[in-house]
Image: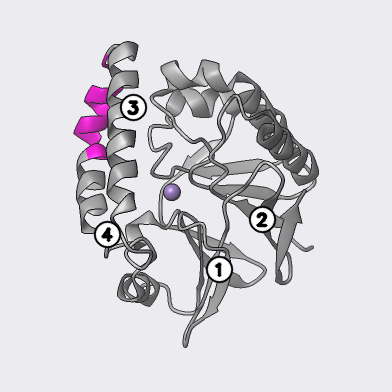
């Protein structure tokens, strides 16, 4: 029997962007017939803790819950929604998975990751990430009053936008040595990641690197793995 796997990433859903949310709902309805669905990070544009953000995305959570009642839904966090946690998983019945995740299907292995940890040329970003995503920081942040969290995240977002404007495109892409280092640990496997918003397929010497693209309100993209790997356009 052929297993059908679907993978998406980088939807960056915002609750008031109705059209993109509808496109995601449409995808989820079509994904019900798959055997498993992977979301490889940044499903949400911001997530400031389950208690604060879940009510803003009530409809999305219902959509995920409906999907997970039909098929397995596995979610990896990205750099925008790294605070997704137990309460989110409980409400949606989705499984949160760590990165990298090794997917074995149809006799082939795929390393799954969001992709930001491969962008090692962006040193200031990696430094920021190591502080923000440190377990202690996360522990403290989600316990701060909601108002403080909103204010802090707004300030951080502005800093990040300002910082990005001064960075070259190369710096914000994956670093080839970081990719090779990762893939050395998984001989024979291919790599699937998102984050860079540069939908493409890179055939390297010993593996292929499939990059998922981000979603707009009008169009999304997915990877489908059955006996082979296909790209899907979501409209
Ligand atoms: Mn990202």
Looking at the magenta stretch, what is its main secondary structure?
Answer: helix
Element class at badge 4: loop
Query: Going 39% across and 25% down the picture, which residue do you hit?
Result: 48
The Cα–Cα distance between marks 4 and 3, rounded to whole angstroms, is 21 Å
Q: Are marks 4 and 2 in contact (CB under 8 Å)?
A: no
Q: Residues within 10 Å of mark 2 (few under 14, many from 20)?
A: many
Residue furthest out toward the bottom: 205
Is tag 3's residue or tag 2's residue first in the polypeptide sequence?
3
Q: Are marks 3 and 1 in contact (CB under 8 Å)?
A: no
In the image, residue 117 sits, relative to residue 185, either above or below, namely above
- Give the alpha-carbon distance from disc 4 to disc 2, as whole Å: 27 Å
Span of residues in magenta? 132-144
- Label 3 element class: helix
Secondary structure of the residue carrying numbered label 2: strand
**Coloration mode:** one colour
Q: Disc 1 or disc 4, which is closer to the eye?
A: 4
Residue that numbered label 2 is attached to: 222
* Residue at image mark 3: 154
- Residue lying at 36% horizontally and 72% vertically, measured from the top left: 185
**Relative vertical location of residue 199 with respect to residue 39 in this rendering, above or below:** below
The N terminus sits in image quarter: bottom right
Tell me the residue at 20%/41% (across/down): 131
Q: If you read the primary sequence from the N terminus, does the residue marked by circle 1 or circle 2 appear first?
A: 1
Q: Position of residue 184 (x, y in %)?
A: 36, 77
Residue to which mark 1 is pinned? 210
For mark 4, what is the residue? 122
Any magenta on residue 142? yes
**CA separation in Å, label 3 and label 1:** 32 Å
Circle 1 sits in a helix, a strand or a loop, which is it? strand
Query: Can you tell which of label 3 and label 1 is closer to the viewer?
Result: 3
Ranked by sequence position, the earlier of labels 1 and 4 is: 4
């Amino acid at each position: 029997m052929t297993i059908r796997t679907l993978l998406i990433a980088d939807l960056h859903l915002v609750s008031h962007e109705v059209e993109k949310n509808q496109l995601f709902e449409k995808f989820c309805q079509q994904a019900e017939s798959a055997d498993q669905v992977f979301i490889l990070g940044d499903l949400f544009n911001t997530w400031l803790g389950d208690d604060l953000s879940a009510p803003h995305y009530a409809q999305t959570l219902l959509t995920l819950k409906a999907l997970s009642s039909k098929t397995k839904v596995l979610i990896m966090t990205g750099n925008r929604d790294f605070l997704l946690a137990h309460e989110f998983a409980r409400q949606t019945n989705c499984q949160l998975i760590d990165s990298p995740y090794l997917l074995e299907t149809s006799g082939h292995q795929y390393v799954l990751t969001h992709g930001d940890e491969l962008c090692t040329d962006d040193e200031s970003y990696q430094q920021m990430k190591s502080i923000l995503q440190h377990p202690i920081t996360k522990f403290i942040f989600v316990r701060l009053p909601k108002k403080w969290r909103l204010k802090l995240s707004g300030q951080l977002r502005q800093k990040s936008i300002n910082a990005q404007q001064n960075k070259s495109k190369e710096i914000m892409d994956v670093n080839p040595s970081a990719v090779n280092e990762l893939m050395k640990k998984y001989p024979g496997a291919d790599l699937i990641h998102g984050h860079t918003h540069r939908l493409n397929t890179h055939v390297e010497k010993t593996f292929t690197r499939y990059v998922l693209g981000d979603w707009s309100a009008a169009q999304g993209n997915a990877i489908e793995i059955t006996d082979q790997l296909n790209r899907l356009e979501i409209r």
